[in-house]
Amino acid sequence: MIKLDVLKYKKIAFLFSILFIVAGVIAFIVCGGFNKGIDFGSGYSETFQVAPLGFTVSYTGKRGATLSVSDNTLVLQFRDADGVEEHKFYSSDYPTSGDLASALSSLGLNVTLSDSSLETQNLVSGFGYPASLSSTPHRVNFSTPGVDVTIENVRDAVNSLNGVKVQTVGDKNKAQFQVRIVLGDNEGQKEAGERVENALSSYFGGENIVVLESNFVGPKFSSSLLKSSLLAVLIAFVLILIYISIRFRLSYALSSIIALIHDVLMMLSFVVILRLEVSGTTIAAVLTIIGYSLNNTIVIFDRVRENIKNNRGADVYEMVSLSVRQSFTRTAITTLTTLFAIVPLSIFGSGEIKLFAINLIWGLVIGAYSSSFIAPSLVMSFHKFFPIDKIKEKKEEEEYSLVD
């Protein structure tokens, strides 16, 4: 068992927490609030890939024709009253865009070749698939691993848009990016999408832009989502207060709630200082950490209660300190084990997963620190006003004597 008297360091712990939260408040004021994501800020986001055009294909025949991409394989289907006729073009059989174009032409499609040297194994499946072919040409694009497109190029392309944010997503070698913009007055999804696509097209060429995903959140929905998220956190706190008040005493309940509020404030301070995006993922991380921290705090408090019960008349300070020491190894192992699973996500993940992992790493550390330092110190502070060893234990002792 680690010989550490955590209560000796309560002033240092309180000072560190206060200074960090104050730094978060200052950052919040200086930066003009949180870096709200599209969930809470309303706006339009588009994930796209810069991929060269291989060829365009159109169809004016009487049958219905559909083109799709699956596992780097181009699939063509003709439909009529007699049924479905399917053709699959595997990259092993048609290694280049020129080979694909020739094969499609032989089946009656109108193909205009732009680059015959692109590799079929790099076919891009974008937002427009499966595509119903018509007289309007449909673009077939191919990614080029190692293409010289950087995030700075994308920022240059969209720097004229209002409130724009750019980030890399997916494989960095495939030139995949996400652009987010703030909506203009009375602007809808169509208008916002056109603004983004026009900016990208003018810089990279419209034929080389493949939209992979687009999302639109209007002001009313984002406001409603923010209120619902805050309500979820508030309900969680109320239920926790009720549960601990029933399970333990008021001192434990107040200490737990204040410690959880401390965890949330530390998390939000971390987010605002590093200018991380606040979205639904952040709320998920906060609720996850509340559960993790509360579980560890209850384990320690339960150990405090048992030690006081089994050592009647012992000094409460010693019992609280002993309980934290007894639980410290468990807390450390649980935290480290969870971090082993989360850290790789923060390194190799992308987008919302990466953001969630980063928030969770900080939350896990703060949760362990809070349940081991802050919550026990708060119990000792409240013990002066709401004793944890003189009221209920006395009744329990009388009941124990009657049983004997």
Image (cartoon, rainbow, N blue to C red):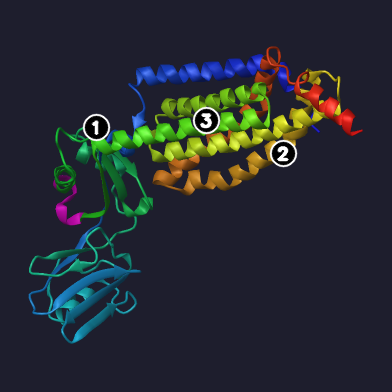
What residue is shown with label 1? 163
Q: Earlier in the sequence, mark 3 or mark 1?
A: 1
Q: Main secondary structure of the magenta part?
A: helix
**Marks 2/1: CA distance?**
46 Å
In screen coordinates, is 115 left or right of 230? left
Residue 207 within the magenta-colored segment of the rendering: yes
Task: Please determine whether, in this image, residue 337 is positioned above or below residue 289.
Answer: below
Three-letter amino acid code at the position of disc 2: Arg
Q: Is residue 4 visible?
A: no
Label 3 neighbour load within 10 Å: few <14, some 14-19, many 20+ = some
Q: Which mark is residue 330?
A: 2
In screen coordinates, is 39 left or right of 158? right
Task: Please determine whether, in this image, residue 344 is positioned above or below residue 181.
Answer: below
Q: Position of residue 329 (x, y in %)?
A: 74, 36
Q: Secondary structure at mark 3?
A: helix
Q: Position of residue 391 (x, y in %)?
A: 76, 19
Q: Quadrant of the N terminus?
A: top right
Q: Nearer the viewer, residue 159 or 96?
A: 159
What residue is shown with label 3? 237
Q: In the image, which residues are magenta? A: 202-208
Q: In this view, which residue lies farthest toward the bottom?
A: 82
Q: Nearer the viewer, mark 2 or mark 3?
A: 3
Q: Residue at x 81, y 27 (%)?
A: 396
Q: Secondary structure at mark 2?
A: helix
Q: Earlier in the sequence, mark 2 or mark 1?
A: 1
Q: Residue at x 78, y 33 (%)?
A: 326
Q: Quadrant of the C terminus?
A: top right
Q: Secondary structure at mark 1?
A: loop
Label 1 neighbour load within 10 Å: few <14, some 14-19, many 20+ = few
